[in-house]
């Protein structure tokens, strides 16, 4: 299999494209971290609301206390 020869400009373009891809991945990871924080906060709030609701409901009668 013959080896391919690349010019300096071609290699620079490859490196530039890789850097662009890494930056895009970094941005996506940052967005995902933010989304995870928002989900965790929503889950905590929901859990607190459910616990509060359970405290107010008498499960034997189904009535609020």
Image (cartoon, grey):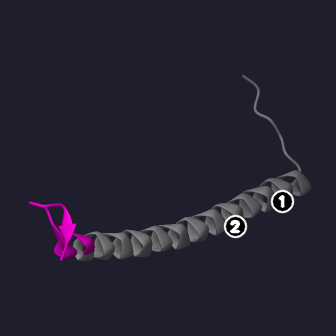
Foreground disc of the pair 1, 2: 2
Position above or below: 37 against 7: below
Report if residue 59 lies within the magenta region.
yes
| Residue displayed at 76% across by 26% down | 2
Q: Which residue is mark 2?
A: 23
Task: Determine the image quadrant of residue 18.
Answer: bottom right
Element marked by disc 1:
helix
Frontmost residue, 9 versus 50 = 50
| Residue displayed at 40% across by 71% down | 40
Q: Quadrant of the N terminus?
A: top right
| First in sequence: mark 1 vs mark 2 | 1
Frontmost residue, 15 versus 45 = 45
Question: In the rendered structure, which segment of residues is drawn in magenta?
Answer: 53-65
For mark 2, does the 10 Å Cα neighbourhood hold few (<14), some (14 to 19), or many (20 or more) residues? Answer: few
Query: Measured from the top left, where is residue 32 in percent x and y?
Result: 55, 65
Frontmost residue, 2 versus 47 = 47
| Residue displayed at 83% across by 40% down | 5
Position above or below: 19 against 14: below
Q: Residue furthest top?
A: 1
Task: Determine the image quadrant of residue 21.
Answer: bottom right
Q: Which residue is mark 1?
A: 12
| Residue displayed at 80% across by 62% down | 16
Element marked by disc 2:
helix
- 61 on left or right of 15: left
Report if residue 29 lies within the magenta region.
no
């Amino acid at each position: 299999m013959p080896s391919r020869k690349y010019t300096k400009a071609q290699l620079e373009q490859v490196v530039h494209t890789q850097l662009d891809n890494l930056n895009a991945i970094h941005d996506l990871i940052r967005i995902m971290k933010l989304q995870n924080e928002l989900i965790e906060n929503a889950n905590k709030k929901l859990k607190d609301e459910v616990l509060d609701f359970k405290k107010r409901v008498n499960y034997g009668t189904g009535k609020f206390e």
